[in-house]
Amino acid sequence: KLSLVNGVLFTGGSVKKGLYFETIKKVFQYVLEKNDAGIHFPLFAQCLGFELVSMIVSEDNNILESFHASDQASTLQFPNYSSLKGSVFERFHPDLIKKLSTSCLVMQNHKYGISPKRLRENGALSSFFRILTTSPDENGEVYVSTVDAQKYPITCTQWHPEKAIFEWRKPMIPHSEDAVQVTQNFANYFISQARKSPNRPPADKVLDNLIYNYSPTFSGKSSKSFEEVYLFS
């Protein structure tokens, strides 16, 4: 299936071992190999996705730390504004960057993460990633909330850019125009990276594998996490 796409998204979730983790490792290696061969192939990893990538890059399944950031809207703090050049945040209007650091515009929902100190002290992680933002959990403990790879088109967030537009059950999810603009900017950035991929698979193969071949199920009344889900049998 990877031959049919122009990039990969690692979603949120809770599975950190077994078949899923092994699959993530293989896909991540595919991303690196494609880019090492000069073929642009982006990856965006969020929440669990970022956690798994951190485990893979560090080669340490115990690299993550505990944080209290479940169902929490938060700010994004920018420790080094000069590091935003070439990143997803470069396309953000300066006013929106300022609002991100002063207003709770993004949704966090995780129990694990990695502190700036631990990331910087790990040679593999510090040489692979640059820290773009940090965020505090409900106890004021600071964790890395956005990174990108120094040599690859890879961006990772501990937070959930998609929530502002698609999820309405939880009242703490930000839905302001600014929050929606953050989501849209992230989506536009990832798609702009995917457009750089030279991969042009056959149209009939693409049509056979589009998500539109499946129907979503409304789960907003029963699920605590998602408005819609896809059920595959």
Image (cartoon, grey):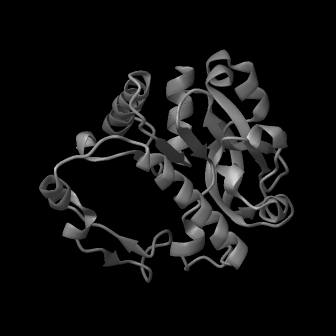
Q: Position of residue 88 (x, y in %)?
A: 64, 49
* Residue occupying the point 47% across, 49% down: 14
Q: Position of residue 158 (x, y in %)?
A: 62, 48
* Residue occupying the point 67% across, 16% down: 123
In this rendering, position of residue 162 left or right of residue 201: right
Q: Position of residue 149 (x, y in %)?
A: 60, 32
The quarter of the displayed image where residue 198 is located: top left
Quarter of the image with the C terminus is: bottom left
Q: Position of residue 71 (x, y in %)?
A: 65, 64
Q: Which residue is at the front of the view, 226 or 128? A: 128
In this rendering, position of residue 210 left or right of residue 194: left
Q: Which residue is at the front of the view, 156 or 15? A: 156
Tell me if residue 45 comes above or below residue 130 in the rendering: below
In this rendering, position of residue 8 left or right of residue 113: left
Number of marks in picture: 0
Tell me if residue 167 comes above or below residue 61 in the rendering: below
Tell me if residue 193 comes above or below residue 119 in the rendering: below
Does residue 12 appear in the picture of this structure? no
- Report the residue that reaches farthest toward the top: 123
The quarter of the displayed image where residue 129 is located: top right
Quarter of the image with the N terminus is: top left
